[in-house]
Amino acid sequence: MSIPDGWDAGELARAARLAARVPAGAGRAGAAARIFAARAPGRVNLIGEHTDYSGLPVLPVAIDRSTIVVAAANTTAEIELANADPGWPSRRFAIERRIPPYETGDWANYVKAAIQGVIDRFSAPATLVDNLRGASMVVDGRVPLAAGLSSSAALTVSTAMAFMAVNGLELDPIETATMVARSEWYVGTRAGGMDQAASILGRRGHALFIEFDPIRVRAVRMPANAAIVVADSREIADKSGMVRAEYNRRVVECALAARILARALKLDGVTILGGVVRAAPGWNAAELVEKLAAAVPARLGADLKEAADILGVPQAVLEAELLGQGAARIALDANRPLEILKRARHVLSETERVIRAADVLEAGRLDEMGKLMNASHASLADDFECSTARLDTLVECARRGGAFGARLTGAGFGGSIVALCDVASADAVIESIDRGYYAKLARGAPESWRAVLHAGAGASVIDLPTA
Ligand code: NG1
C-alpha cells in the first residue's frame, strides 16, 4: 500500500499492527467489510493562550506525534475498545442518546466524549442513534500525556473520525473541528476549540492562525531556519483535579469581564470577549481594559452577587448561565474573589500579540516572534496567574540557551514550555534546559522530556486493506 497523504511509514505500520487486533468477525463480513484507521496529531501552541474559550485567535502547530485509532463495524450497538498500551484497560459501552461517563479520570471518557459528539451532531432531529453501527476500536496513542501537547484532542479527534468512517458519515475538516470543539466539556473542562482544530487543520511545515465563531484557519509557513523546542516540566497539570477547577474559574472570570464590558459599551447579547472585539472595530487592548476598569472593581465576589447587580440580572440567572447545570456545573471556591481586570488584560493583550505573531512569523522575523512569546509568558504569569516557579525556570533556561523566546504552553499550572530558536541553536537550548533544569530533578531521563518538534499534517482517515 502506498503511503497516504499526511501519514508516514511508521504510522502506517502501527495501523496495520492494530488492525490485526480487531476481533475476527468485526468488519470482515457483508457491506461493512472494511477496516478504517484514523490518525490525529497532538499540537503545541506557539502563542494565543487562554484565548480560545473567549472566541479569540490562537497560533498553534499540529505536531509530528499522533494517536491512531483503528476501527471496524461490529454487529452490536456497542463500542468495544482496546488500547495498545496494556496499562489502559479495555472497555465496552452502549451507543445511546446520552452516554453516561465512566468515573472521573477514566481514559475511555475521551472516547465516549467523541462518540457523544458524533451522536449530537448527526442525530437531531432524526433518530440516527438507533441506526448507528457499533464498532470495535483499538487505540495507540503516541502523544506524550499530561505534557501540554493535547494527547486528549488527538484521542477524541481520531476516535470521532474513525467512528464516522465506520458509519459512512462525512464532514469537511472545518465541520469536524466544530463538532469536536466542545468534546472536552464531556469530561468537565470548559475548553475552547483550539486543540481539536489544530489537530484537524494541521499542515506540514506550517503554523495555524485559527479564529473561532465560526472556525477559520490561515496556514502560516514556518521559516526554514525555525526550530520548535518543547520541554516538559514534569509538574503534572492534572486535568481532572485542581487544574480543571483553576481552568474553569478562568473561563468564568473571562465571561464576566466580557459581559460587563459589553454592557458598558452597550453591545447587546455579547457574552464573550471575542464578541466585544468583533463589535468594536479599531479596538485596542489598553482602551478596552480602561473601559472595563471604569465599569467594575478589579475583583468580584465568587458568589456572583455583585456581578449580578452590576449586570442588572438576577443572581440565579447569572449563576445558571456562567456555571452551567447538573453534574457538569462549575463549582467555584467561594472564599476566593474572581479576578476580572487582570484576566481581561491578559486575554485582550494576548489577542494583539497573536495577530501580530502570525505576521512576523510569516515574514521570518523570529526575534520579534520571540519577544511576543516572552511577553505572552509574562502576561500569563502576572495577569493570568497560571505559571509556576518550575515553568518560569524552564523558560529562563531556554532563553539563556539562545532561544528567541519561550513561554508556557497549554493551560499552564504545570505541563510544558515551548521555545522558538534557530535550527542551529536547538542543541544549545536543549543543553541549557538539561543543565539548568533537568539535572536538578531528583531522577531523570531528559531524552524523553524535551524534543524538537516539527509542524505536521492534520488528522485523516484511511481504509486499510482487509485480510
Ligand atoms: P491544554 O492544557 O494543552 O490541554 C487547554 C485547553 C485549550 C486552551 C488552553 C489554554 C483543554 C483540553 N484544552 O489546553 O482549549 O484553552 O488550555 O490556551 O482543556
Image (cartoon, helix red, strand yellow):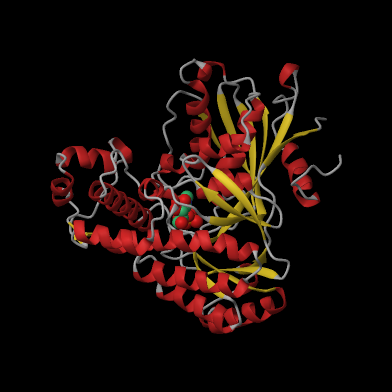
Q: Quadrant of the C terminus?
A: top right
Residue at image coords 53%, 80%: 437
> Residue 441 at x, y = what percent?
51, 78
Instruction: Determine whether, in the image, residue 304 is placed left or right of residue 396.
Output: left
Instruction: Determine whether, in the image, residue 428 is placed left or right of residue 249.
Output: right
Instruction: Determine whether, in the image, residue 360 is placed left or right of residue 372.
Output: right
Q: In terms of depth relative to the viewer, which is nearer, 260 or 130?
A: 260
Judged from this view, the residue extending furthest toward the front is: 282
Q: In terms of depth relative to the viewer, which is nearer, 193 or 248?
A: 193
> Residue 340 at x, y = what percent?
26, 58
> Residue 442 at x, y = what percent?
51, 79
Picture layout, residue 95 above or below residue 267: above
Q: In terms of depth relative to the viewer, which is nearer, 79 or 37?
A: 37
Q: Quadrant of residue 401?
A: bottom right
Residue at image coords 86%, 39%: 1
Q: Is residue 4 visible?
A: yes
Task: Give the total of numbered labels.
Answer: 0
Residue at image coords 63%, 20%: 75
Q: Is residue 339 visible?
A: no
